[in-house]
């Protein structure tokens, strides 16, 4: 493990918070960068332990607010991530990586001396960190970013977690069913900033999208099996047969990219399906698009849907946990009850044929996500209040401890 730290003057806050991030890229990294920047003026120091040296579009270690950084230096773009728990004859036991992570965490905790540890992913990703923190008597909170049930190994370690932040009301019910007490749970939607999105959307777009009279369907996100980009193409091909000016953009990178590019070439879709790879200009891209698409198997909190709505795009999404907390069927988009290419195509066709319906749904979506439930300041203040409550073991001062989104 490599690390760095910087001597600082006390910034006036009373807490040192050490964050742990297991992701290399994606929504969790982006969300954590906003939390780090938002909390920095409120706490004494912010530290960070990452699994990867380069964390996607937002290199967390380069943020000015991070005053201590340690890294496990996992090889980039290796999937799946190393497991912390394995099973032999159904008996769970720690992996070699777990021991390495445990030792690295102990070192980071001893050097940074945090008042609280903040896990930004699933508990199983960070079992060694939970163990090390609890051995040293340091409280732990976890920002759970998926909408699945706790694994058996996680249920045991969840008892050591002081607070569990979940992204949606549906996920709140899931973890309650898994035995997490209500008083341990904080439900908090990911935030969004309409003004910042609008500012970014005006920047010149380098992606191959033109205002040529075509109607663009866009799906943003990793190109992997969970996101089902192949299903997006299947549905698009059906819709294209009735909508000659329809085009599809897949913006993102991942293990399925090469296969998708090959399929587009073999099926002669190169004029209408664009697999553009990672895009750092999502607001600008969405400004040129007309329909936002999500056909994933599952999502913790689909940030892409929030971005579609900020860009005033109607949403077409397959049914998944908590999607109805964002997309109200027939109001700001269509929720398809099953992973059916014909049903997805039908929604695309309806929106293709009615610019007025696209406008109405797009405006409704924009209004929905600019509600205070998704406000960035509220998000940070709720997290800060929760951290103070855990550290001080009493009600936070000046912050409503019940201020949970929704």
Image (cartoon, helix red, strand yellow):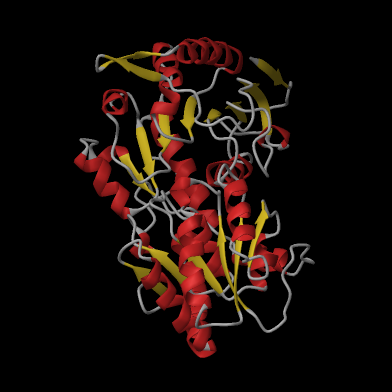
At x 48%, y 26%, the residue is: 117
Image position of 179 with respect to 69: above or below: below
Closest to the observer: 352 or 239? 239
Q: Which image quadrant for residue 35?
A: top right
Query: Where is the C terminus found, in terms of image quarters?
Result: bottom left
Residue 74, given in percent of the width and then of the height, sits at: 61, 23
Residue 224, given in percent of the width and then of the height, sits at: 51, 46
Image position of 380 with respect to 104: above or below: below
Residue 61, given in percent of the width and then of the height, sits at: 69, 32
Q: Is residue 332 visible?
A: no
At x 69%, y 38%, the residue is: 59
Q: Which image quadrant for residue 18?
A: top right
Query: Where is the N terminus found, in terms of image quarters?
Result: top right
Residue 258, given in percent of the width and then of the height, sits at: 62, 47
Q: Is residue 310 visible?
A: yes
Closest to the observer: 341 or 400? 341
At x 49%, y 67%, the residue is: 369
Give the total number of marks visible in the rendering.
Answer: 0
Closest to the observer: 233 or 73? 233
At x 41%, y 77%, the residue is: 346
Q: Is residue 172 left or right of residue 246?
A: left
């Amino acid at each position: 493990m490599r690390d760095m730290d910087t001597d600082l003057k006390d910034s006036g806050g009373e807490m040192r918070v050490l964050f742990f991030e297991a992701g290399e890229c994606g929504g969790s990294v982006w969300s954590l960068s906003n939390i780090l920047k938002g909390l920095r003026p409120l706490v004494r120091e912010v530290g960070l332990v990452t699994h990867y040296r380069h964390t996607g579009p937002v290199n967390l270690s380069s943020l000015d607010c991070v005053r201590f950084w340690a890294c496990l230096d996992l090889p980039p773009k290796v999937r799946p991530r190393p497991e912390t728990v394995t099973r032999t004859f159904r008996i769970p036991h720690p992996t070699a990586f777990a021991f390495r992570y445990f030792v690295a965490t102990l070192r980071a905790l001893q050097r940074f001396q945090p008042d609280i540890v903040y896990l930004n992913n699933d508990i199983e990703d960070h079992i060694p960190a939970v163990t090390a923190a609890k051995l040293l008597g340091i409280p732990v909170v976890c920002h759970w970013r998926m909408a699945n049930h706790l694994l058996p190994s996680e249920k045991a370690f969840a008892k050591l977690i002081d607070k569990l932040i979940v992204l949606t009301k549906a996920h709140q019910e899931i973890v309650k069913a898994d035995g997490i007490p209500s008083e341990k749970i904080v439900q908090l939607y990911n935030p969004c900033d309409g003004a910042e999105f609008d500012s970014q959307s005006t920047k010149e777009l380098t992606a191959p999208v033109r205002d040529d009279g075509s109607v663009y369907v866009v799906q943003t996100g990793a190109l992997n099996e969970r996101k089902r980009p192949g299903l997006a193409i299947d549905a698009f091909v059906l819709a294209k047969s009735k909508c000659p000016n329809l085009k599809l953009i897949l913006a993102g990178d991942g293990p399925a990219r090469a296969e998708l590019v090959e399929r587009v070439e073999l099926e002669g879709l190169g004029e209408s399906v664009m697999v553009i790879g990672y895009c750092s200009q999502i607001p600008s891209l969405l400004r040129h698009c007309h329909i936002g698409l999500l056909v994933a198997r599952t999502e913790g909190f689909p940030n892409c849907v929030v971005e579609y709505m900020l860009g005033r795009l109607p949403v077409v999404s397959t049914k998944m946990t908590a999607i109805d907390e964002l997309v109200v069927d027939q109001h700001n988009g269509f929720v398809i009850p099953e992973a059916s290419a014909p049903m997805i195509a039908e929604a695309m066709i309806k929106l293709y044929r009615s610019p007025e319906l696209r406008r109405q749904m797009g405006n409704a979506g924009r209004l929905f996500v600019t509600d205070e439930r998704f406000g960035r300041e509220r998000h940070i203040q709720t997290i800060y209040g929760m951290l103070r409550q855990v550290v001080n073991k009493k009600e936070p001062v000046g912050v409503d401890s019940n201020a949970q989104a929704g």
